[in-house]
Image (cartoon, rainbow, N blue to C red):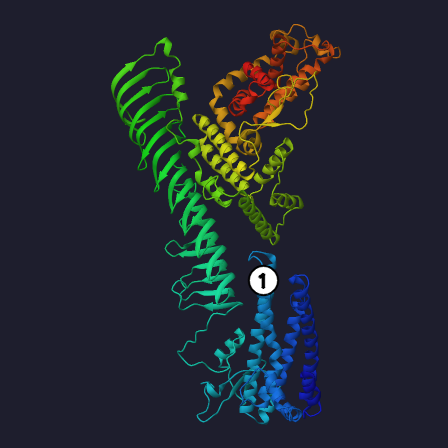
C-alpha cells in the first residue's frame, strides 16, 4: 500500500524539495519493510522451533531496528513540515477515487471527519506503533526469567529502549505538527523564506509578553525561536527571552503554553521504564519513582525518592520493595543519614542486611518487618568513642532476647549469657581484662542470685550476689592458699567486704578442694546446646524445615539447588566472575547425591567430600552456617574472652557444634548411619607386619577384630572442616590454661638439649646405641644427629589441627624410630616398652615443641573415644606420660 502511494505521488508533486523528501522517505521505508519481514520470520521460528529468545531479530539486531526507525521518522517529519501530505492528497485522492474506504481502513484514525492529509499522515506514521508492540513482546518474554538473571536484564533493557524510542519519536512528530501549524497560521514571503525541512519551531512571541528594552511606544516586536535560529522581525532586537532559551537548552518543548496554576497529573505507565510522581498513595505521597513498571506498579529495578530526602534504590515487586536494595534516611539533627543495604520483602526490611545508623552504630544480621530479628551483630561506637561495644546474638523484634555475647570494650568486660528485652536475664558468664571470672544468675541487667566468682590468683567465692561484683548473703570464700571462710558477706569485690562467719584452715586431707571447685565451673553458665540456637534455626528454615529435623529432605535439596543457582546468576554480571574450579564445585553442589544399596565406605567418602566443598562455599546453607559459627566463636573467645577459665566452655561449645551439624547432615543424607555405628569396609588392606598398625579410624587391628570397619562419629566427619577455622582461639586457651606446666616443661627441654647425643641418651637410660645402625657415627660432641627423621616427623604435630591428624603424626614417629633402627634389629624383633620409652623420650626432647602439653590436652579432649583403646591410643598414652 505504501509503495503504491509513493509511486503514484512521485509524478504529481509540484516542488522539487517535496519530491526529494518523498524519495528519501521511500528509501527509508523499504529498509524498514525488510526489517519487519525479518522480524516476522524470526518470530515464527521462535514459536515453532527452539524457544531461544536471543535469536529474535528485534533483540539480536536491536540497534539496527532502532536506527532504521529513527531515520524513517526523521524523514517523515521533514516531509510533514514541508506540507508534503497536503501536496500528496490530490494524487492520493485520484488513486483512491474508486475505493476511498481502503485508505480509511488502513489508517488507525477512524473519525469520519478526518481530512485526507491527516489520514495520510496517520497512515505513514503507523509503522512507528510497532515499537510499542516490540517493547511489550520483549517484556512478556522477560517475565519468564528471574528478575536477577542476565536474560531478564537484557530483555528488559531492550524493551526499555524500544519504549523510549517510541516516546521520543512521538514527541518529534508533535514538534513537526506544531511547526507545520505555525507555517499555516503565518503564511507569507518572510515565513516561507525561513521554512526548511529540518527546522522546528520552539516558541514564538505572539502569545507571550516579550518586548525590547527601551523600545518605541508603537513598535511591534515579533520573536521566533527555532531549534537552530532566533528571528526578530525588526532590525534592532534584544535576546530577552531567557525562559524560552532555558527550555530549549533543557530540551523541553511546549506545543502550547500551559494554563497558569493548573497541574495535570498523569497515570502511571503500564509496562515500561518511566519516571512518575505519586500523589494518591499515602505511603508514597509526592515520592518520585524512576524505573521499571508492570501493570501500573513499580516492578523490577528502580529508584524511589521522597521529598524528605529518603531514597530507595533496588528491586521492586508488585509496587513494593522486594529483593535486594539500598535505603537511605537523612538525619538532619546529626547531619548524617541512616543507611540499610540488604533484602526486602513486601515493602519491609526482611532477611540478611546491614544497617549503618547515623549515630555510628552498625548492625549486620537478620531483619523481619523492619526490625532486627534473628541472629545479628551490633557494633556501637568506635574504639576512640566514649562507649564502644559489640553484641552478637539473638534478636526478637528489635531487642536482644535469647543467647548473646556482649563485649564492653571500654570496661574491659565480656558477657556470655541469656538476654530478655535488652537486659541480661537468666544464667550468664562474665570475664574481665583483669582476670575476674563470674558465672551465675542475672536479673534486670545485674548479677543477682547465686553465682561463682574467681579472681586471677584463684581465690573463689561461691554464694549470693545483689549487684555487679557485689556480694550480699550467704557464701563460701576460699583463698588461693586453701584457707576458707563460710558465713554472710556484703560489699563490692575489690572495695572491701564485710564478713560474718567462720574461718577454716584446710587439713592435709583437703588438698584437692581447690581442684574440685575448678571442676565445677560451667554448671551455672548457659549449656552449650542452648547457645546460638537462632543460627541453627535459620539454617533449618533455609532448608525448608520450620522445626529442626522435621521436613522433607527432597525439599531441602531443592532449596539448596535454588540458592546456588541464583547466586551463580548474580555472579555472572559481577566484575569478578567465578573461576572454572569454583564453577565446577558449585555445579557439583547443585546435584543431589544418589545413594542406592547398602552404605559403604565409598559412599561415606563421597559424603565427606561433599561436606568439605559445601562448608567452604558461603553460597551453600551449610557453608553459611559454618561461616557464622566461626565468627561467633572467635567473637566469644578472642580479646577479653581469651581467659583460661573458658577452656572447658570452648571445648563443650565445639562438641555441641559437631552434634547439631551432624543432625543436619543426617537429615540431608538419611542413609548415613547414626553416631557410633560401624561401616564395613569394602576392601580390607592388610598391613605390613613389620610396621606398627595405624588405626586411622578403624575399630581395631585385624588380629583384634575379625570384621574391621570404620566407626561413624560427628568428630571424625566434621572436625576436619570445622577445627582448622576455630584452632587459633582454642589453642590460645589451652596455652593459657597450661602456661605454668608449659614453662616448667620448656625449661627442662632447654636444659637437656644442651647435652650432646651420647650424654643425653645415657642420661635417659639408653646404654646401647647400636640400634642406630652401622652407618651412624655418634661422637661425644655431636648433637641432633640421632633419629633426625623421627624428630622432624614429631615436629609436624604443631602444623596439624585435628586430633586424628596429630595421632597419625605420633604413629608415624614410632614408625620412623623403628625404621631407622631396622638394620640392627633381628627379624621379627618387637620393641619392649622399657627399650622404646627412653628412645621416644629422646625424640620428644630433640623435637623442641614449645606447647607440647597443650597439644596433648587438645588431643585428649577432642579425640574419638573408640581410639583410646587402639594402637594409636597406646602410643598417645606413651607421649602423654612423657610430658
For the point 63% across and 83% down, the residue is 78
Identify residue for label 1.
142
Horizontal side of 512 relative to 235 (left or right) equals left
Q: Local crowd at mark 1 within 10 Å, few (<14), some, or many (≥20)? A: many
The reply to whether residue 20 is visible in this rendering is no
Residue placed farthest to the right in the image? Answer: 775
Where does the image place residue 501, in percent across and percent down from the top left?
25, 18
Q: Provide residue 98's location: percent of width, then percent of height.
A: 65, 93
Residue 461 visible to the viewer: yes
Give residue 341's position: percent from left, percent from top: 48, 52
Relative to 275, 582 lies left or right: right
Q: Quadrant of the C terminus?
A: top right
Q: Quadrant of residue 418?
A: top left
Residue 403 position (above or below residue 254): above
| Tag 1 secondary structure | helix
Is 498 in front, or is 706?
706
Q: Residue lying farthest left? A: 500
Position above or below: 657 against 350 = above
Q: Residue 708 vs residue 492: left or right?
A: right
The residue drawn where x is 26% and y is 16% is 502
Name the residue nearer the viewer: 215 or 317.
317
Q: Residue at x 49, y 86 (%)?
A: 205
Taking depth in this image into account, of 665 and 321 the one nearest to the observer is 665
Q: Is residue 459 above or below residue 609?
A: above
Write down the quadrant of residue 573 in the picture: bottom right
Amino acid at each position: 500500500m505504501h509503495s503504491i502511494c509513493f509511486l503514484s505521488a512521485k509524478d504529481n508533486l509540484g516542488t522539487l524539495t517535496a519530491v526529494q523528501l518523498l524519495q528519501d522517505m521511500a528509501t527509508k521505508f523499504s529498509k524498514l519493510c525488510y526489517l519487519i519481514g525479518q522480524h516476522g520470520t524470526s518470530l515464527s521460528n521462535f514459536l515453532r522451533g527452539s524457544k531461544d529468545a536471543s535469536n529474535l531479530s528485534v533483540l539480536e539486531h536491536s540497534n539496527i531496528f532502532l536506527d532504521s526507525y529513527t531515520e524513517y521518522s526523521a524523514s517523515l517529519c521533514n516531509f510533514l513540515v514541508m506540507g508534503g501530505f497536503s501536496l500528496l492528497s490530490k494524487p492520493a485522492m485520484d488513486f483512491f477515487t474508486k475505493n476511498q474506504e481502503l485508505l480509511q481502513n488502513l489508517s488507525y484514525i477512524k473519525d469520519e471527519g478526518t481530512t485526507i492529509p491527516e489520514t495520510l499522515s496517520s497512515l505513514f506514521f503507523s509503522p512507528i506503533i510497532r515499537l510499542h508492540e516490540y517493547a511489550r513482546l520483549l517484556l512478556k518474554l522477560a517475565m519468564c526469567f528471574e528478575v536477577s538473571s542476565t536474560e531478564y536484564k537484557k530483555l528488559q533493557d531492550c524493551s526499555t529502549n524500544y519504549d523510549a524510542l517510541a516516546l521520543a519519536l512521538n514527541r518529534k512528530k508533535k514538534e513537526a505538527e506544531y511547526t507545520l501549524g505555525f507555517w499555516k497560521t503565518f503564511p507569507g514571503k518572510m515565513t516561507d523564506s525561513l521554512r526548511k525541512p529540518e527546522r522546528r519551531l520552539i516558541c514564538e512571541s505572539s502569545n507571550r509578553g516579550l518586548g525590547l528594552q527601551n523600545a518605541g511606544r508603537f513598535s511591534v516586536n515579533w520573536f521566533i525561536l527555532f531549534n537552530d535560529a532566533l528571528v526578530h522581525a525588526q532590525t534592532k532586537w534584544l535576546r530577552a527571552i531567557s525562559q524560552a532559551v532555558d527550555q530549549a537548552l533543557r530540551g523541553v518543548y511546549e506545543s502550547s503554553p500551559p494554563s497558569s496554576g493548573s497541574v495535570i497529573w498523569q497515570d502511571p505507565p503500564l509496562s515500561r521504564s518511566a519516571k512518575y510522581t505519586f500523589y494518591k498513595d499515602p505511603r508514597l505521597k509526592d515520592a518520585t519513582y524512576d524505573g521499571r513498571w508492570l501493570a501500573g506498579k513499580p516492578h523490577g529495578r528502580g529508584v524511589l525518592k521522597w521529598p524528605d530526602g529518603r531514597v530507595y534504590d533496588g528491586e521492586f515487586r508488585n509496587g513494593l520493595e522486594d529483593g535486594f536494595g539500598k535505603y537511605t534516611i537523612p538525619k538532619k539533627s546529626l547531619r548524617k543519614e541512616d543507611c540499610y543495604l540488604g533484602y526486602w520483602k513486601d515493602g519491609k526490611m526482611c532477611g540478611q542486611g546491614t544497617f549503618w545508623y547515623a549515630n555510628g552504630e552498625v548492625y549486620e544480621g537478620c531483619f523481619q518487618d523492619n526490625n532486627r530479628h534473628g541472629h545479628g551483630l551490633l557494633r556501637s561506637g568506635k574504639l576512640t568513642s566514649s562507649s564502644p561495644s559489640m553484641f552478637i546474638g539473638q534478636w526478637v523484634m528489635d531487642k536482644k532476647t535469647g543467647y548473646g555475647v556482649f563485649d564492653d570494650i571500654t570496661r574491659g568486660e565480656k558477657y556470655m549469657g541469656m538476654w530478655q528485652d535488652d537486659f541480661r536475664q537468666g544464667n550468664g558468664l562474665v570475664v574481665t581484662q583483669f582476670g575476674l571470672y563470674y558465672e551465675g544468675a542475672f536479673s534486670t541487667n545485674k548479677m543477682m542470685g547465686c553465682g561463682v566468682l574467681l579472681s586471677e590468683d584463684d581465690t573463689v567465692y561461691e554464694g549470693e550476689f545483689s549487684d555487679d561484683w557485689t556480694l550480699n548473703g550467704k557464701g563460701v570464700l576460699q583463698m588461693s592458699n586453701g584457707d576458707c571462710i563460710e558465713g554472710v558477706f556484703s560489699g563490692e569485690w575489690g572495695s572491701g567486704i564485710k564478713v560474718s562467719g567462720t574461718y577454716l584452715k584446710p587439713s592435709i586431707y583437703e588438698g584437692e578442694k581447690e581442684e574440685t571447685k575448678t571442676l565445677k565451673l560451667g554448671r551455672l553458665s548457659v549449656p552449650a546446646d542452648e547457645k546460638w540456637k537462632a543460627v541453627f534455626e535459620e539454617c533449618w528454615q533455609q532448608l525448608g524445615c520450620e522445626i529442626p529435623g522435621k521436613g522433607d529432605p527432597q525439599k531441602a535439596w531443592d532449596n539448596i539447588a535454588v540458592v546456588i543457582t541464583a547466586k551463580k546468576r548474580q555472579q555472572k554480571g559481577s566484575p569478578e566472575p567465578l573461576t572454572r574450579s569454583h564453577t565446577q564445585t558449585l555445579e557439583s553442589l547443585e546435584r543431589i547425591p544418589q545413594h542406592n544399596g547398602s552404605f559403604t565406605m565409598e559412599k561415606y567418602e563421597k559424603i565427606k567430600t561433599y561436606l568439605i566443598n559445601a562448608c567452604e562455599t558461603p553460597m551453600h546453607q551449610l557453608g553459611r552456617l559454618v561461616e557464622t559459627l566461626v565468627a561467633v566463636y572467635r567473637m566469644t573467645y578472642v580479646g577479653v574472652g581469651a581467659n583460661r577459665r573458658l577452656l572447658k566452655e570452648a571445648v563443650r561449645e565445639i562438641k555441641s557444634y559437631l552434634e547439631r551439624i551432624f543432625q543436619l547432615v543426617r537429615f540431608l543424607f538419611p542413609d548415613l548411619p547414626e553416631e557410633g555405628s560401624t561401616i564395613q569396609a569394602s576392601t580390607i588392606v592388610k598391613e605390613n607386619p613389620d610396621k606398627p598398625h595405624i588405626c586411622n579410624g578403624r575399630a581395631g587391628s585385624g588380629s583384634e577384630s575379625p570384621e574391621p570397619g570404620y566407626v561413624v562419629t560427628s568428630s571424625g566427619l566434621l572436625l576436619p572442616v570445622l577445627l582448622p577455622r576455630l584452632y587459633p582461639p582454642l589453642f590460645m586457651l589451652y596455652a593459657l590454661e597450661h602456661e605454668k606446666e608449659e614453662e616448667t616443661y620448656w625449661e627442662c627441654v632447654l636444659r637437656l638439649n644442651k647435652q650432646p647425643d651420647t650424654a643425653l641418651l645415657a642420661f635417659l637410660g639408653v646404654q646401647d646405641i647400636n640400634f642406630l645402625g652401622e652407618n651412624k657415627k655418634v661422637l661425644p660432641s655431636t648433637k641432633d644427629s640421632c633419629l633426625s627423621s623421627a624428630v622432624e616427623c614429631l615436629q609436624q604435630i604443631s602444623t596439624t589441627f585435628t586430633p586424628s591428624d596429630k595421632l597419625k603424626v605420633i604413629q608415624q614417629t614410632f614408625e620412623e624410630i623403628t625404621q631407622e633402627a631396622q638394620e640392627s634389629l633381628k627379624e621379627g624383633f618387637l620393641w619392649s616398652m622399657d627399650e622404646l620409652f627412653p628412645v621416644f623420650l629422646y625424640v620428644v626432647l630433640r623435637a623442641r615443641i614449645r606447647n607440647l602439653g597443650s597439644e596433648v590436652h587438645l588431643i585428649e579432649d577432642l579425640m574419638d573415644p573408640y581410639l583410646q583403646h587402639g594402637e594409636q591410643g597406646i602410643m598417645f598414652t606413651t607421649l602423654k606420660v612423657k610430658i
